[in-house]
Amino acid sequence: MADDIYYTIEKTATAEFKDRGSKFVGYACPVKTVVECKEKLNEIKKAHPKATHHCFAYRIGLDGNTFRVSDDGEPSGTAGRPILGQIDSKGLTGTLVVVVRYFGGTLLGVPGLINAYKSAASLALQMTPVAQKQVEKEYRVQFDYTGLNDIITLARQYNCRVVHQEMQLFCYMILAIPNNRVTEVIYKLKEMKNVEVLADDQRSSSRQ
């Protein structure tokens, strides 16, 4: 994963794979946090209460180091790892894939299970486009209301994203700046009158 871009999905997609009577329903879901992964998994479990297994894998975070796999009662290594392998083969993060199995009465064996979970995950991921995203860093920009137009113009010019804003006596906005434009944008913001810029870590420490 490059320093300035990452790849993810933005829409949930589903696909089915069948083998010797067993049905495997794959769900590919965009997620940002572990809590969100749990919520999505619970939703899918509620939608398939009679399924034999609800296996899954996810990878989240810009560094890609937060991940988990679950075989949910299937033989070890036959479900979660093959599912994660499909996420990783596309270089994705922010992605959860759940594969629900309805047992069809015939044992598939280890190679059959690996193929089935891998195929269901792959098909689900093929149903949703991969999105290239910019790595961003958030800053709190405090300013006088008269400077709003200049800040908005600058944000558009450098493809920054306004995460949140408050327009009161003292105005501020949370600005997500592309990683490769941070130096330029911060320099230009600090050149403006009555503008103060705080990095995300400075904002966090000030709240403690």
Image (tube, grey):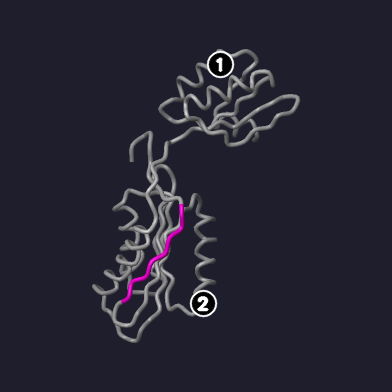
Name the amino acid, label 1: Lys
Q: Residue furthest left?
A: 111
Residue 111 placement, left or right of 104: left
Check residue 190 in the rendering and tell me which mark sits there, or answer none: 1
Percent coordinates x, y for residue 89 in the rendering:
29, 53
Q: Main secondary structure of the magenta part?
A: strand
The Cα atoms of the two marked residues, 2 and 1, are separated by 56 Å
- Residue 50 to residue 181: above or below: below
**Residue placed most toward the observer, 164 or 110:** 164
Which residue: 55% across, 28% down?
199
Residue 134: image quadrant is top left
Q: Tag 1, which secondary structure?
A: helix
Percent coordinates x, y for residue 37 in the rendering:
49, 58
Q: Is residue 16 magenta?
A: yes
- Residue 63 to residue 190: above or below: below
Residue 76: image quadrant is bottom left
Q: Which residue is mark 2?
A: 49
Name the amino acid, label 2: Pro
Q: Tag 2, which secondary structure?
A: loop
Q: Earlier in the sequence, mark 2 or mark 1?
A: 2
Q: Quadrant of the C terminus?
A: top right
Check residue 127 in the rendering and tell me which mark sits there, or answer none: none
Q: Residue furthest bottom?
A: 105
- Residue 72 to residue 153: above or below: below
Q: Is residue 83 magenta?
A: no
Q: Quadrant of the N terminus?
A: top left
**Residue range of the region highlighted in magenta in the rendering:** 11-18
Which residue: 33% across, 37% down?
2
Q: Residues within 10 Å of mark 2 (few under 14, many from 20)?
A: few
